[in-house]
Image (cartoon, coloured by chain):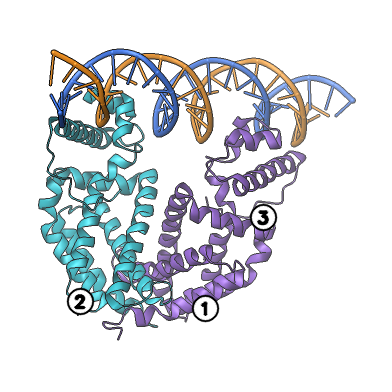
Chain colours: A purple, B cyan, C orange, D blue
DNA sequence: ACACTATTGACAGCGACTGACACTTCACAA
DNA sequence: TTGTGAAGTGTCAGTCGCTGTCAATAGTGT
């Protein structure tokens, strides 16, 4: 659920052991999901392949869904961090686009510490094509949007609940990102560069698309 | 799941009986959801209070969620119908706003044939505040958005997959509607007029919010 | 009145998830 | 180094959403 704090130095043997089982569960789950589909994979299958009890799985992940969003968690907090790092002088949309660029560039590195990048890409496709996961994804995204809106409002010294602009801007921005994310998942080119360029291109159309007349 | 066709004249006694059990299940479920919360209500409770078997419930509704969206179904198809009815000459955003107006005005009547309006309002609040239902709501909305985008593309004689503008425009528009829907659910004034005015006001901010600088 | 078939109830079973409790294993201090 | 407390885990039993099956019942058209 979007951890903001770093996992702490991990001192004892106990900690390391925990980390290892969590990793094992995560990878086993994602591989199984990709191989057989999300709903076709039972929690028992996951835990059997890691040789822990089913109960243990639910001690690490609140539910079966959550394991599918481990990578997305990182991406989201990565973006939020990038946004916070943008210079205060920038306008809202400039900051958002800048944060997008920044987070794309350093993403692969941060991501691969937890999950191989190509595994993430295939997981993302799975999320987009599995109704239950897509629903969870959208709900999570809504939470992130709210946080982004608050950040933007803060940058501009506004009250989110009084001025509509922060939420409206973020809604438009996020809407475009949803569209490009979906298209990326459906398309052939699954590289990080592809989604980045696609998003940039679509963001450029946000102005023209809102013109009263397209002709 | 978004019925486009009218329920047909309903001839036989059999049909009427079916309709009655469906209605009974629907109302009983919504009342229980509102009274005790969605997750705190079991399907058995619903069916017991209508005196049918649990199996019957699942013959009328694919899952427990679905029953919560019966009203939303009507609203969505109502809006789509309104959009289709807008004159071809209008620009995309004008048509969307027009459709919004049109559907608000005739909504209460169409809605109350299935569910009392105040029951719907309380159900909506429940959806917004119940994570599982919110997720389902967002996924359903995403489907509606796709249909809207296709309609807009059709109006403008464009290819949805080639020109980004239809999806981008709809994404921005829908994003704003999500925001206002959420605020409406949180606010005190739960009348239809309130959400209508709020949405109109927020839509007016979509241009300014996208300006490079807000100062 | 008579077959025909749509609708239902009863029952069994699966999979996600939870609470309770006992057991193992690490951590830390005496 | 050893004893003690706590953290982590496994086992078991149980709830709830949901599905398949099959026999019983109740409208329908002749």
Which quadrant would residue A28 be assigned to in this image? Answer: top right
Label 3: state its secondary structure: loop
| Quarter occupied by the C terminus of chain A | bottom left
Q: CA distance from mark 3 to mark 2?
A: 50 Å
Q: Are marks 3 and 1 on the same chain?
A: yes
Q: Is residue C3 above or below residue A32?
A: above
Which residue is denoted by mark 2 in the rendering? B88
Q: From this view, report whether residue A14 is shown above or below residue A150.
A: above
Relative image position of residue C10 (x, y in whole percent): 34, 14
In the figure, residue A120 lies in which quadrant? bottom right
Q: Which of these two is toward me, A131 or B136?
A: A131
Q: Which residue is mark 3?
A: A115
Question: Could one spot residue A86 in this view of the protein?
Answer: no
Q: CA distance from mark 3 to mark 1?
A: 31 Å
Dot 3 or dot 1: first in sequence order is 1
Local packing at callout 1 (Cα closer than 10 Å; few below 14, some 14-19, many 20+) is few
Q: CA distance from mark 2 to mark 1?
A: 45 Å
Q: Residue at x 57, y 36 (%)?
A: A42
Q: Is residue A33 left or right of residue B56?
A: right
Query: Dot 1 falls on which chain?
Result: A
Of badges 3 and 1, the one in the foreground is: 3
Q: Which residue is mark 1?
A: A87
Q: Chain of mark 3?
A: A
Q: Residue at x 47, y 69 (%)?
A: A180
Labels 2 and 1 in the same subunit: no
Left or right for C28, reference A115:
right
Q: Position of residue A92 (x, y in %)?
A: 42, 76
Residue A36 appears in view: yes
Q: Position of residue D16 (x, y in %)?
A: 39, 28
């Amino acid at each position: 659920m979007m951890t903001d704090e770093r996992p702490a130095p991990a001192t004892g043997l106990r900690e390391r052991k925990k980390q290892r089982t969590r990793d094992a569960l995560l990878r086993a789950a994602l591989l199984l999901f990709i191989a057989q589909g999300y709903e076709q994979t039972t929690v028992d299958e996951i835990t059997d392949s890691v040789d822990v009890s089913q109960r243990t799985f639910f001690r690490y992940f609140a539910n079966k869904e959550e394991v599918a969003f481990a990578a997305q968690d990182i991406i989201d907090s990565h973006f939020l961090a990038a946004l916070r790092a943008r210079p205060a002088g920038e306008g809202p949309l400039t900051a958002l686009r800048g944060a997008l660029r920044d987070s794309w560039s350093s993403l692969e590195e941060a991501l691969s510490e937890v999950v191989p990048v190509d595994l993430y890409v295939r997981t993302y496709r799975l999320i987009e094509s599995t109704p239950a996961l897509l629903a969870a994804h959208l709900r999570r995204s809504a939470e992130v949007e709210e946080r982004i809106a608050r950040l933007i409002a803060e940058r501009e010294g506004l009250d989110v609940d009084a001025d509509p602009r922060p939420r409206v801007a973020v809604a438009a921005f996020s809407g475009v990102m949803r569209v490009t994310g979906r298209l990326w998942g459906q398309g052939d080119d699954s590289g990080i560069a592809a989604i980045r360029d696609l998003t940039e291109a679509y963001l450029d159309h946000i102005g023209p698309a809102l013109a009263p007349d397209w002709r």
